[in-house]
Image (spheres, rainbow, N blue to C red):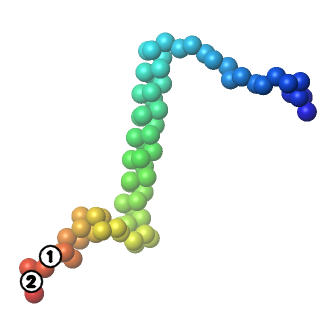
Amino acid sequence: MGADNGESLKPTQISISKDQFLAWKRQKDAELLAKQAEAARKRQEDIASGRVPMNGRELFLHEPWVFDDTHH
């Protein structure tokens, strides 16, 4: 259509300093940690309310008596 003249589009390159990159990276890491913490909090709420089943590790942490085979 408009770009059929044989030229390919090249991505624009912007030079940034190391400090700018590190600041961006810290921000992205913080956003990722916040997202993971929110997902973990929501998972804990869902488990507590019984909306989702627990995996083995969660069952062991929340109800260890299930794995206690000392009382036969």
Percent from the top left, x then y, of residue 71?
Answer: 9, 83
- 17 vs 6, nearest the viewer: 6
Q: Secondary structure at mark 1?
A: loop
Task: Kindly identify the amino acid type of the residue bearing the numbered disc 1.
Answer: Asp
Q: Is residue 12 left or right of residue 1?
A: left
- Residue, far right: 1
- 53 vs 46, nearest the viewer: 53
Q: Secondary structure at mark 2?
A: loop
Task: Kindly identify the amino acid type of the residue bearing the numbered disc 2.
Answer: His
- Residue, far bottom: 72
Quadrant of the snapshot with the C terminus: bottom left
Q: Is residue 70 left or right of residue 21?
A: left
Which residue is label 2 attached to? 71
- Residue, far front: 6
Q: CA distance from mark 1 to mark 2?
A: 7 Å
Percent from the top left, x then y, of residue 36?
Answer: 41, 47
Q: Is residue 61 left or right of residue 2?
A: left
Instruction: Identify the disc placed on residue 68.
Output: 1
Quadrant of the snapshot with the N terminus: top right
Pointers 1 and 2 in contact (C-beta within 8 Å): yes
At 45% from the left edge and 27% from the top edge, which residue is drawn? 25
Q: Can residue 61 be seen by looking at this rendering?
A: yes
At 71% from the left edge and 22% from the top edge, which residue is drawn? 10
The correct choice, above or below, for 17 with respect to 40 in the image is above
Q: Dot 1, crowdedness within 10 Å: few (<14), some or many (≥20)?
A: few
The correct choice, above or below, for 13 with respect to 56 in the image is above
Q: Quadrant of residue 41?
A: bottom left
Q: Quadrant of residue 22?
A: top left
Percent from the top left, x then y, of residue 19?
Answer: 44, 15
